[in-house]
Amino acid sequence: MTDAGATWTDERVELLKRLWTDGLSASQIAAELGNVTRNAVIGKVHRLGLSGRAKDAKPTTAAPRARKVTRAPSAPTPIAPQAHSNVVLAPIPLQPAREEREVMVEEEDVAIPMSERVTIMDLRESMCRWPMGDPTKPEFRFCGARSITGLPYCTHHARIAYQPVTDRKRERKLARA
DNA sequence: CCCTGATTCGC
DNA sequence: GCGAATCAGG
């Protein structure tokens, strides 16, 4: 790949258009595209002639805050994935090789407070999008912890997601001597 | 302080 | 055309 993805290809422009029309904020889109800042996104949006998108149930500025969804305890509303096909798509992290996976699951289980897990409806750009569980099931959740600004994951999951596949385990052990 | 989009202007 | 810096605001 000669270009590191930091160029406006047709695909990226299409995604940009779709996300912008869907009401996502520039920074959300930037984080989703990767390798671009929110300024770049805004600049491109204006150059494309898209500004002020649909005036649909939008307050004034800012992204649509997560809505609180009330559901009856006896009849939990399943979250249908197909119903939100044009909303935020969670980037599925690369699945590490078996050795890494053991470590990953281990740490994940320990470090994540269940109380912070959120559904896609409550997911915000500033929240960790680490997918948990089967996306086809209603129980599917995201980590939801505070994400690093500009990254889709919290510090914990960013570590896991972006870990170089090289010797980090040995490094850790050797470092504590 | 967190965030939003809008504009300018050097590249 | 591009986007960082800046501006103006919630």
Image: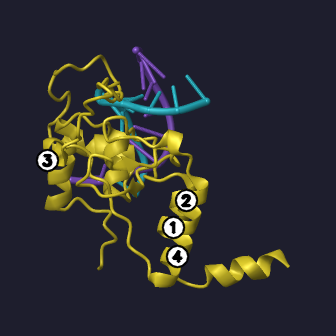
Chain colours: A yellow, B cyan, C purple
- In the foreground, A108 or C1: A108
Quarter of the image for the N terminus of chain A: give it.
bottom left
Reading the image, the residue beneath label 4 is A102
Q: CA distance from mark 1 to mark 4?
A: 5 Å
- Which residue appears at 38% of the width and 66% of the height? A93
**Side of B2 relative to A93 (left or right):** right
Q: Chain of mark 2?
A: A
Asked if A170 appears above or below A81 in the picture, the reply is: below
- Which residue appears at 70% of the width and 81% of the height? A171
Reading the image, the residue beneath label 3 is A82
Reading the image, the residue beneath label 1 is A105
Q: Residue A109: which numbered mark, if any? A: 2
Q: Earlier in the sequence, mark 4 or mark 3?
A: 3
Q: Are marks 2 and 4 on the same chain?
A: yes
Q: Amino acid at mark 4?
A: Glu
Q: Position of residue A103 (x, y in %)?
A: 56, 73
Can see residue A164?
A: no
Quarter of the image for the C terminus of chain A: give it.
bottom right
Q: CA distance from mark 3 to mark 1?
A: 28 Å
Count the numbered circles shown: 4
Q: Chain of mark 4?
A: A
Q: Amino acid at mark 3?
A: Gln
Residue A167: quarter of image = bottom right
Q: Are marks 1 and 4 in contact (CB under 8 Å)?
A: yes
Q: Chain of mark 1?
A: A
